[in-house]
Image: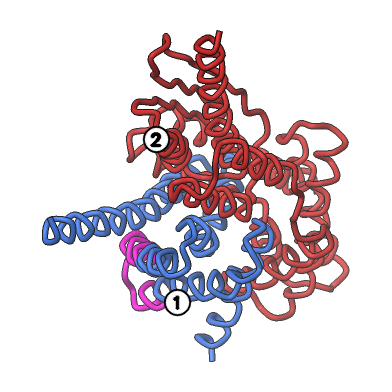
Chain colours: A red, B blue
């Protein structure tokens, strides 16, 4: 009887370790961590809880994780459907995994902490982020050799463009459409400003304002993944980046051809 | 004067991007600094007449090295600093120009600009990977010395 209970507890424990690793991986992947870091973190967590062998297979749309124990190998799959960039969560999970590796946290504690990180929503307020996008649009205009006359139009167009991505994404959860509409709005605004004599070079205003939407991080991570041998992740991220660039480009294209 | 404007705007742009990506508050200044450093290297090299591909590799390499130093100092993932740093180097303007030529049916210009944009993003990645390779080599040689 006692022996049976032990085994049951042992089994339960294995599942918990698996859940902790998977949750850590899920948070990191959804927050925009690199593929190798996700795989590495999951295997490290499992190893610090005494799992000698584990395999993780991470793609941008799902995680597969299996651990080898005395029992038959257990494997779990987790679907990842939305991906954003939230560097704070990456950092929090990273420091949690460091603490696990040091042996400071047992399995239930770690699981609770990760659950709290997963549910937390400690982002900057929407207003702050829109303000940041506007200011960066103005700064990019200057970096791309624009004139100070166009600074304010770029700030306004960039802020409205960034805000409308969020708005349209909430309205219809198709990222492509949201980006298309946002760049359309930016294009219309830029031309409008120039027509009203408020700005000078529509091209520069558009380039500056579009920068907060450009998938720069995705493109670079895609190439990095490809070089590192994560071929599927690299191709998937490349496809996502291409779609975003295409959405932005076609939004602007509509404006340029019809106005 | 131009350099000063470039320094200030690239610092603000990179720090603002760190806000958009929700980087922790205490890392914002560092992100801005990394971005400024990379951009100014790129800016000076490209205005000196060096081709933009090697200029981008050099800038991305420097960004990655400084980011790794920061990551080690503050025990944070290196991606936090790299992300904000490389944003100014991303060929957004080039991709936009290429799209414009596509729309106006000037496919020759469009394809050549798209290829250039691809080369530049590839060289950003090259710069980062290069610094990672050197970092790993250093770590291995240190391990050997201890072992």
Residue, disc 1: B40
The quarter of the picture where the C terminus of chain B appears is bottom left
Q: Main secondary structure of the magenta part?
A: helix
> Could you tell me which residue is drawn at 53 percent across and 86 percent down?
B2
- Residue closest to the far front: A2
Mark 2 vs mark 1: give the one in front.
Answer: 2
Q: Secondary structure at mark 1?
A: helix
In this view, the residue in front, B78 or A45, is A45
Q: Is residue B1 left or right of residue B143?
A: right
* A1 to B34, vertically: above or below: above
Residue A205 figure quarter: bottom right
> Could you tell me which residue is drawn at 40 percent across and 55 percent down?
B124
- Cβ–Cβ below 8 Å for labels 2 and 1? no
Q: Is-magenta flag for residue B54?
A: yes
> Could you tell me which residue is drawn at 72 percent across and 63 percent down?
A133
In this view, the residue in front, B123 or A124, is A124
Give the x, y percent position of residue B146. Answer: 14, 60
Residue A158 figure quarter: bottom right
Give the x, y percent position of residue B116. Answer: 41, 50
Residue, disc 2: A47
Part of the protein shown in magenta: B44-61
Kindly tell me whether residue A153 is visible in this rendering.
Answer: yes
Give the x, y percent position of residue B10. Answer: 56, 74
Give the x, y percent position of residue A136. Answer: 67, 68
């Amino acid at each position: 009887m006692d022996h049976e209970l032990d085994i049951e507890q042992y089994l339960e424990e294995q599942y918990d370790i698996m859940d902790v690793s998977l949750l850590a991986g899920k948070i990191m992947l959804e927050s925009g961590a690199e593929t190798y870091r996700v795989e590495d973190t999951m295997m490290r967590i499992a190893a610090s809880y005494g799992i000698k062998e584990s395999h993780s297979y991470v793609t941008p749309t799902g995680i597969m994780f299996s651990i080898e124990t005395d029992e038959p190998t257990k494997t779990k799959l987790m679907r990842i459907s939305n991906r954003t960039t939230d560097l704070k969560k990456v950092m929090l999970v990273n420091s949690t995994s460091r603490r696990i590796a040091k042996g400071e946290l047992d399995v239930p504690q770690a699981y609770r902490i990760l659950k709290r990180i997963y549910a937390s929503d400690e982002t900057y307020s929407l207003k702050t982020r829109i303000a940041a996008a506007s200011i960066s649009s103005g700064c990019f205009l200057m970096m791309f050799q624009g004139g100070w006359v166009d600074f304010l139009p770029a700030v306004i167009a960039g802020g409205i463009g960034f805000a409308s991505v969020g708005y349209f994404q909430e309205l219809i959860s198709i990222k492509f459409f949201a980006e298309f509409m946002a760049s359309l709005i930016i294009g219309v605004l830029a031309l409008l400003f120039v027509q009203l004599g408020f700005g000078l070079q529509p091209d520069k205003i558009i380039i500056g304002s579009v920068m907060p939407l450009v998938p720069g991080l995705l493109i670079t991570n895609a190439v990095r993944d490809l070089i590192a041998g994560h071929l599927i992740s690299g191709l998937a991220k490349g496809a996502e980046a291409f779609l975003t660039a295409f959405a932005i480009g076609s939004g602007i294209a509509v404006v340029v051809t019809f106005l | 004067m131009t350099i000063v404007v470039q320094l200030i705007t690239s610092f603000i742009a990179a720090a603002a991007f760190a806000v958009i990506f929700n980087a922790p508050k205490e890392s914002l200044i560092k992100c801005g600094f990394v971005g400024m450093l990379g951009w100014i290297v790129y800016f000076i090299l490209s205005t000196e007449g060096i081709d933009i591909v090697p200029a981008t590799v050099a800038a991305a390499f420097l960004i990655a090295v400084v980011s790794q130093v920061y990551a080690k100092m503050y025990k944070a993932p290196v991606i936090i600093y790299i992300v904000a740093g490389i944003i100014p180097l991303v060929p957004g303007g080039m991709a936009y120009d290429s799209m414009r030529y596509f729309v106006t049916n000037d496919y020759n210009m469009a394809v050549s600009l798209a290829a250039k944009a691809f080369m530049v993003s590839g060289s950003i990645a090259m710069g980062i990977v290069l610094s990672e390779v050197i970092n790993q080599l250093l770590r291995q040689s240190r391990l050997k010395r201890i072992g």
